[in-house]
Amino acid sequence: MGKIYKLLFKVCNLSFLVTVIINVITALIVYSLRYQKYLNYIAPAVQSVLIGFIASCVPRRGVEEKSLKPINP
């Protein structure tokens, strides 16, 4: 049971760090373009698009596995 919690903790930490990095980079770009008043709208939009793209690229288990037997033979 301890291994599961350690893995979950690592995944949560990694996702938090990715979110912080995306927000910092977005803030730097927005500040350099002088659109500070739109930062509260731009940062979550960029974050959701990038994280959604990353999540959609992760392959799911069981897709295209030939070793699985069909349910109705």
Image (cartoon, helix red, strand yellow):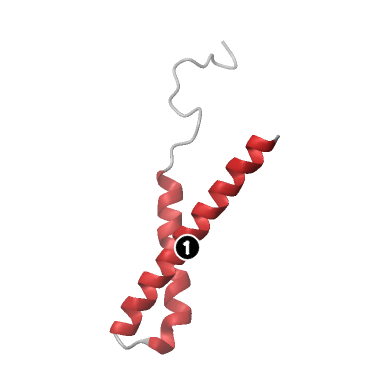
**Residue at the outermost left position:** 33
Q: Which amino acid does label 1 sit on?
A: Thr
> In this figure, which residue is indicated by the disc labeled 1?
19
**Residue 39 spot, x, y in % from top left:** 43, 81
62 versus 51 height, above or below: above
Q: Quadrant of the C terminus?
A: top right
Q: Residue at x 45, y 59 (%)?
A: 18
Q: Residue at x 48, y 80 (%)?
A: 40
Q: Judging from the image, what secondary structure is the residue with disc 1 in?
A: helix
Q: Residue at x 53, y 14 (%)?
A: 69
Frontmost residue, 49 versus 10: 10
**Residue at the outermost top position:** 73
Dot 1 surroundings within 10 Å: few (below 14), some, or many (20 or more)? some
Q: Residue at x 54, y 54 (%)?
A: 13
**Residue at the outermost right position:** 1
42 versus 68 height, above or below: below
* Left or right of 29 on screen, residue 13: right
* Left or right of 10 on screen, residue 1: right
Q: In which quarter of the image is the N terminus?
A: top right
Tell me where residue 34 sits by quadrant.
Answer: bottom left
* Left or right of 40 on screen, residue 3: right
44 versus 62 height, above or below: below
Frontmost residue, 24 versus 37: 24
**Residue 58 spot, x, y in % from top left:** 43, 42
